């Protein structure tokens, strides 16, 4: 009997237990420090990555090749099966395009691949993959699953705050003058993703005020969908106490049926945001 499988990339920041429970497969991006190249989650742990990030060498990411995706598709699927491949915003990485190329490569093997551009990053990708995997477990048809997936993509809300503007500056997201001014004034920008691109949303003086404002913004999302349950994901870059406090506040105030999915921002995303970042991504359930 033909089956449906779910594949995502390491930028999804899904906790291992969630991936194992739902049978979600991951293709890693690579992280390069000088001449050293590591596969995210395979050769490089999150703690080791952030320890190295404090050194003098600025790392970069390398997207998976089409061959990497082809290998994963052939590993998890058989002829007649379908793979739903859920990935980072195509405007942030070439990962999605590699998956598209690989989908044509395995079509000759009788494997159908449906690629999904989440227009998101971090746990936003993960939440969409979870929707797909839950649909598979519920026995929904491919069309029914994709309807729920597309709804989650279109209704995703993204709020995140960085501890330092330095990594955004290095990656060309903000200018040198803006980064210097923000550092001097202790400005913590609240950022979002608009059509798959990082965009400034608001500014707060100090991280505490920024997190309080994110809590308020999430409350506004709750009010926007009064009759729907919310799926909420929270990731952090080595800021467990702040993340736990925020997650507990959400579970207390948002009347969620399921717990907040909380995980670490891994190397794929951490390269671009740095240590201390907190991100909240959420969408109404279908």
Image (cartoon, rainbow, N blue to C red):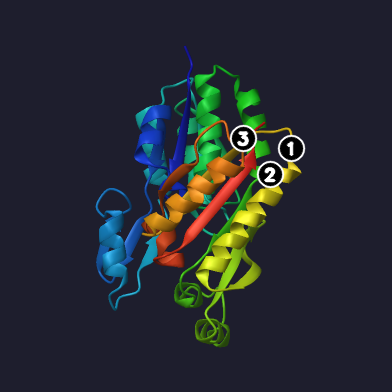
How far apart in space, not on screen, are marks 1 and 2 (Cα)?
A: 6 Å
- Whether residue 184 is situated above or below residue 73 in the rendered picture: below
To which residue does mark 2 refer? Answer: 222
> Neighbour class for label 3 at 10 Å: few (<14), some, many (≥20)?
many
How far apart in space, not on screen, are marks 3 and 2 (Cα)?
A: 20 Å
The image quadrant where one finds the C terminus is: top right
> Neighbour class for label 1 at 10 Å: few (<14), some, many (≥20)?
few
Name the residue at 24% across, 65% down: 36
Number of numbered discs visible in the structure rendering: 3
Question: Which residue is more in the foreground, 66 or 135?
Answer: 135
Kind of element beneath mark 2? helix
Residue 265 rendering spot, x and y as whole percentages: 41, 55
In-image side of 169 versus 238 (left or right): right
> Neighbour class for label 2 at 10 Å: few (<14), some, many (≥20)?
many
In-image side of 252 versus 228 (left or right): left
CB-based contact (under 8 Å), mark 1 and mark 3: no
Kind of element beneath mark 3? helix
Name the residue at 60% across, 64% down: 191
In-image side of 268 versus 4 (left or right): left
Residue 6 rendering spot, x and y as whole percentages: 47, 32
Question: Which residue is more in the foreground, 34 or 80?
Answer: 34
CB-based contact (under 8 Å), mark 1 and mark 2: yes
Viewer-nearest of labels 1 and 3?
1
To which residue does mark 1 refer? Answer: 226
CB-based contact (under 8 Å), mark 3 and mark 2: no
Kind of element beneath mark 1? loop
Residue 182 rendering spot, x and y as whole percentages: 55, 81
Q: Earlier in the sequence, mark 1 or mark 3?
A: 3
Residue 72 rendering spot, x and y as whole percentages: 37, 37
To which residue does mark 3 refer? Answer: 149
């Amino acid at each position: 009997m033909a089956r449906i499988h779910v594949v995502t990339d390491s930028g999804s920041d899904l906790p291992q237990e969630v991936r194992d429970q739902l049978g979600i497969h991951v293709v890693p991006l690579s992280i390069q420090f000088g001449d050293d190249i590591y596969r995210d989650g395979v050769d490089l742990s999150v703690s080791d990555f952030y320890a190295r990030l404090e050194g003098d060498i600025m790392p970069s990411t390398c997207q998976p090749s089409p061959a990497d995706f082809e290998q994963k598709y052939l590993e998890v699927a058989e002829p007649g099966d379908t793979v739903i491949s859920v990935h980072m915003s195509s405007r942030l990485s070439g990962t999605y395009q590699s998956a598209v190329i690989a989908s044509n490569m395995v079509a000759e093997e009788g494997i159908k691949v449906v690629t999904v551009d989440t227009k998101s990053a971090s746990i936003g990708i993960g939440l969409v993959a979870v929707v797909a995997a839950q649909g598979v477990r519920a026995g929904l048809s491919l069309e029914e699953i994709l309807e729920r997936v597309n709804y989650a993509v279109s209704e995703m809300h993204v709020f995140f705050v960085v501890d330092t503007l330095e990594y955004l500056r290095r990656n060309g997201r903000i200018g040198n003058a803006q980064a210097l001014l923000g550092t001097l004034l202790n400005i913590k920008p609240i950022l979002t993703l608009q059509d798959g691109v990082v965009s400034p949303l608001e500014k707060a003086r100090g991280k505490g005020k920024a997190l309080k404002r994110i809590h308020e913004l999430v409350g506004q999302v709750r009010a926007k969908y009064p009759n729907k349950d919310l799926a909420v994901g929270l990731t952090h870059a080595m800021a467990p106490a702040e993340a736990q406090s925020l997650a507990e506040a959400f579970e207390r105030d948002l009347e969620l049926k399921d717990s907040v999915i909380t995980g670490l921002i891994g190397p794929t995303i951490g390269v671009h945001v740095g240590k201390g970042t907190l991100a909240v991504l959420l969408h109404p359930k279908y």
